[in-house]
Image (cartoon, rainbow, N blue to C red):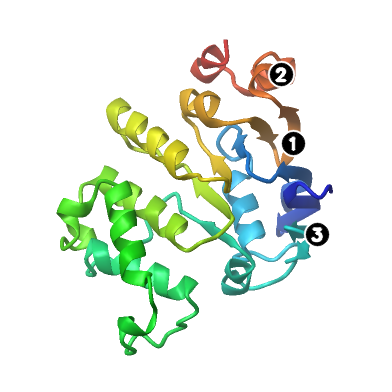
Amino acid sequence: MTENTALALEDLHKSFGATAIIRGVSLDIRAGSCHAIIGPNGAGKSTLFHLITGRLKLDRGRIRLAGHDITGLSPHRVFRHGLARSFQVTSLFPRLSVFENLRVAAMWQARCGHAYWRSVAGYPGLHGRVLDMLENLHLTPRRNVPAAALAYAEQRTLEIGLALIGGAHTILLDEPTAGMSRAETERAVALLRRLAGGRTLVLIEHDLSVVFDLADTISVLAEGQVIASGSPQTVRGDAAVRAAYLGTAAEDLA
């Protein structure tokens, strides 16, 4: 681990019963970079995210975030150290409006805890921060719409906004463009590029065009192990990676 490392994974292991899912994963993720984690279905990618964020407990290994040991911490304590995530399945407050969803996330970052009965006026700048994020997400016209009534791509966009507005320096994105059309995907990629703002992005993504468009570094997970890690050009030409991506996905690496 170096001073420029945002997230360091050291020999992570996780099994469910007799089945090993994560088998000795070690990675150093550079601060301010976009680091993609790819791999075939069942490789252990989402499980790895769950371990990093504290949703699952490690069997063995160590996780450091900006130099702080976060191994074994609960998800809310991991967040307090500066890490946020989005989910493969949207995780919004469906009956709250777009504005209210963003305000709740901003209040949590402002350490309001669960004291939502307090006046928002007690947190200077919060209202403006929410309005700025609405504008950046191109959701201002939808600010009063319940999250459940948004189109699917808008829900995914809002979830990215929830992760970003919290002020975390490291953001984990689990398939941020899943289910989007090509045009929607292009808008989401442009949004991430525009709003990253020096943050560290770690993303799981099956759309390899998104991966090669956004990522500075790509790590390939197969059967719970990292089989390759490096620049997009290095990973694209790796024989083990091509073997892991039989069929259409392998053609996308060409």
- Helix, strand, or loop for circle 3? strand
Which residue shows up at 74% across the image and 62% down it? 58
Q: Which mark is residue 226?
A: 1
Which residue shows up at 40% across the image and 68% down it? 105
Task: Give percent across and percent down for residue 188.
Answer: 37, 37
Q: Nearer the viewer, residue 175 or 59?
A: 175
Q: Nearer the viewer, residue 176 or 40?
A: 176
Q: Nearer the viewer, residue 129 or 248?
A: 129
Q: Residue furthest front?
A: 124
Quarter occupied by residue 56: bottom right
Q: Residues within 10 Å of mark 2 (few under 14, many from 20)?
A: few
Q: Which mark is residue 62?
A: 3
The first of marks 2 and 1 along the sequence is 1
Looking at the image, residue 1 lies above or below residue 129: above
How far is disc 2 from disc 3 in space, using C-alphas? 27 Å
Query: Which kind of residue does numbered mark 2 sit on?
Result: Thr
Which residue shows up at 31% across the image and 82% down it? 121
Q: Nearer the viewer, residue 142 or 48?
A: 142
Q: Which mark is residue 234?
A: 2
